[in-house]
Amino acid sequence: MLPAQLRNRQNIFLKGDGLARYGRKAVEFNKRASTGIGRYLINRVGKLQAAILRNISNKNSISSGNLYQSVGGSLREEITPSKISVYMLIPRYTDYIDKGVKGAKSSYASSRNSPYKYTTKKPPLEAMKRHLTMKYGTPKKDLYFKSKSLQEKIFKKGLKGTGIVSRAYNDKFKTNLNEGVIKIVKEEAIVSILEL
């Protein structure tokens, strides 16, 4: 949360009224602070994105390429008077791939701590068919039986957790990100005190 004076100045800057009261330098500070933190966040989130893409490639978990392409999409920056956000959009199912899913009968060691579990509903058969066709080129005549077999195996045993996101977005990354933002805010606050 920004201090009240800074918030008020940013609101005035965004609304465009009453600028003469606060002077040009206060407005320039707001602009510079938000772009400095914004650039830093885009840089750090871009590095996170690259690490996740490396993990996807290294785990040989590319089947259709949809996950790799959607994670590799562009980053979005949003600056409002009270916060600066950088978004990396990833599909919802990424969490299942990352943490794994426990099976109805047993589970893999990498998915034992997963919050997800198959209980009564089996994975969709169409998804199994797409996976087998794209990854292995399974011929149509064998597709139904192999899909059904894979569906049963996943339902009973679950899915292995790959850690493609959690290995990159870990406590070390979060700590470094927070420390970097704090450093930029301190530097910009010192600059503003000297200029006002």
Image (cartoon, rainbow, N blue to C red):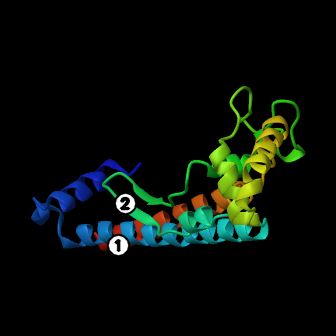
Structural distance between the alpha carbons of marks 2 and 1: 15 Å
At 80% across and 39% down in the image, what residue appears?
A: 152
**81 left or right of 93?**
left
Q: Is residue 163 visible?
A: no
Q: Amino acid at mark 2?
A: Glu
Instruction: Inspect this view and state whether residue 185 appears.
Output: yes
Residue with the mark numbered 1:
32
Q: Quadrant of residue 109?
A: top right
Above or below, 87 relative to 184: above
The percent position of residue 181, horizontal first and vertical second, equals: 52, 63
Which image quadrant is residue 58 in?
A: bottom right
Query: What's the residue type where badge 1 is placed?
Result: Arg
Q: Which of the two residues, 84 or 181, is positioned nearer the viewer here?
A: 84
Is 63 left or right of 14, judged from the image as shown? right
The C terminus appears in which quarter of the rendering? bottom left
Of marks 2 and 1, which one's residue comes earlier in the chain? 1
User: In percent of the image, x 73 and y 53: which residue is there?
Assistant: 143
Mark 2 nearby-residue class (10 Å; few <14, some 14–19, many ≥20): few
